[in-house]
Image: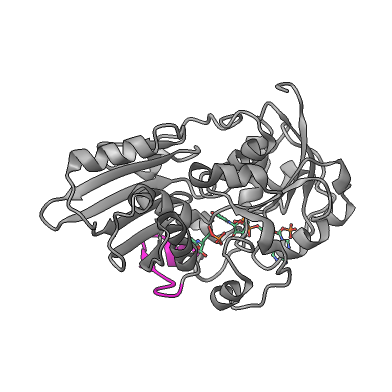
Amino acid sequence: MQNQKYKVAIIGASGFTGSELARILSQHPQVEIKYITSESHQGRPFSDLHPQFLSIIDQALVSAEDIDVSSLDVIFLALPHGVSMDFVKKWKDNNCKIIDLSGDFRLSSPELYEAWYGKPHTYVKGFEGAAYGQPELFAEDIKRSSLIANPGCYPTASILSLAPLFFENMVQNHSVVIDAKSGLTGAGVKASDTTHFSNVNENFKAYGVGVHRHTIEIEEQFSHLSDGEVQIQFTPHLLPIDRGILVTSYAKTKKLTTQEDLFSLYQNFYADKPFVRVKTSVPSIKDVRGSHFCDIYPFWDKRTQRVVAIAAIDNLLKGAASQAVHNMNLVLGIAETAGLNQIPLRP
Ligand SMILES: NC(=O)C1=CN([C@@H]2O[C@H](COP(=O)(O)OP(=O)(O)OC[C@H]3O[C@@H](n4cnc5c(N)ncnc54)[C@H](OP(=O)(O)O)[C@@H]3O)[C@@H](O)[C@H]2O)C=CC1
Ligand SMILES: CC(=O)N[C@@H](CCC(=O)OP(=O)(O)O)C(=O)O
């Protein structure tokens, strides 16, 4: 029903992805935002905290303890890792869909979670029914699931950059290197030494070398796509900008290719995916900023016999909030593109 309004709640709306969810959902033709929650700011108008919403969303923030979950169709959890799982456990028996933006249910087992997140999982059963929410790759799983694990920001760009090659089982194992860069909002709203202005401004650095938790998330999805165990080298970097991710992915293929074949492979793979734009030139972060697009340039380097795939997304949108809304559209069975037509903000 096109005029049906689905009732949703945004849990953890004082953060960056929570506020971006509010921006998109408030313009979604089939959504009514029933609750916006914050524990540390409950009682204050949402627009006090996020002034861009003044006279648009002035409703008061409430505690997550006080919401009537039975009245909701969809809950978005914009909470840190290790916090989301408690809410999923508490609300799982209500007849509503839960879309979790954290990493709590993205991996395939609690053991892997503990190994990469450094803490035990407290809701092991949740893994059973969770779908990995990459809409371009797993739409059918997403439509069937009541718990959707929204992918991480780096994994979104990284997975989309090489998915066509893995799907065709064309990649030589151990040959993949992913060099990724993110703007600061990827680190969340709380300031730290790492995100202090003078440590970031006019600076650029790698972090999490060899140990970043997104390594396993990407490996698991590539393994899933290609039906074999995949290992990758993944290195994230912190860019001195607000938002945006650019990844450069390198892979050796099992058989030789050409630029024309590579481009057609990507174009065909993403032909019916409205938010992936396969390009013939390099993408930049400003080409996608503020939008749900992922732009990809697949390049065959004849000299080194390598694929170089460059992908750009907005970490807060395609890497988080708009991806969550895309998942909502799929799980509710409404138009896939509803509410997601933001044109990138450039310059
Ligand atoms: N930022 C990004 O680019 C991306 C983020 N994600 C993931 O999405 C989730 C939300 O991210 P983001 O919006 O950036 O995070 P923020 O840190 O900006 O916001 C998280 C919010 O969660 C609430 N919260 C509730 N309980 C706790 C707790 N125990 N400790 C800390 N905060 C708590 C806080 O609000 P309050 O205290 O007011 O209740 C806080 O504002 C995270 O899991 C993140 O990893 C995923 C992809 C991209
Ligand atoms: C710049 C920056 O700090 N980025 C975050 C990733 C944010 C994100 O997408 O991921 P999760 O939901 O998996 O936390 C980081 O590297 O931890």
Answer above or below: position of 169 versus 336.
below
Q: Is residue 72 magenta?
A: no
Magenta portion: prevailing SS class: loop
Question: Is residue 197 rendered to the left or right of residue 50?
Answer: left
Residue 288 position by quadrant: top left
**Between 3 and 144, which is closer to the camera in this rendering?**
144
Residue at the image position 40 percent from the left and 37 percent from the top: 270
Residue at the image position 67 percent from the left and 48 percent from the top: 145
Colouring used for the render: one colour
Residue at the image position 60 percent from the left and 47 percent from the top: 141
Ligand 1 located in image quadrant: bottom right
In the picture, the quarter occupied by the C terminus is top left
**Between 332 and 28, which is closer to the camera in this rendering?**
332
**Between 252 and 346, which is closer to the camera in this rendering?**
252
Residue 321 in view (yes/no): no
Residue 174 pos. (x, y %)? 31, 68
- Residue span colored magenta: 196-211
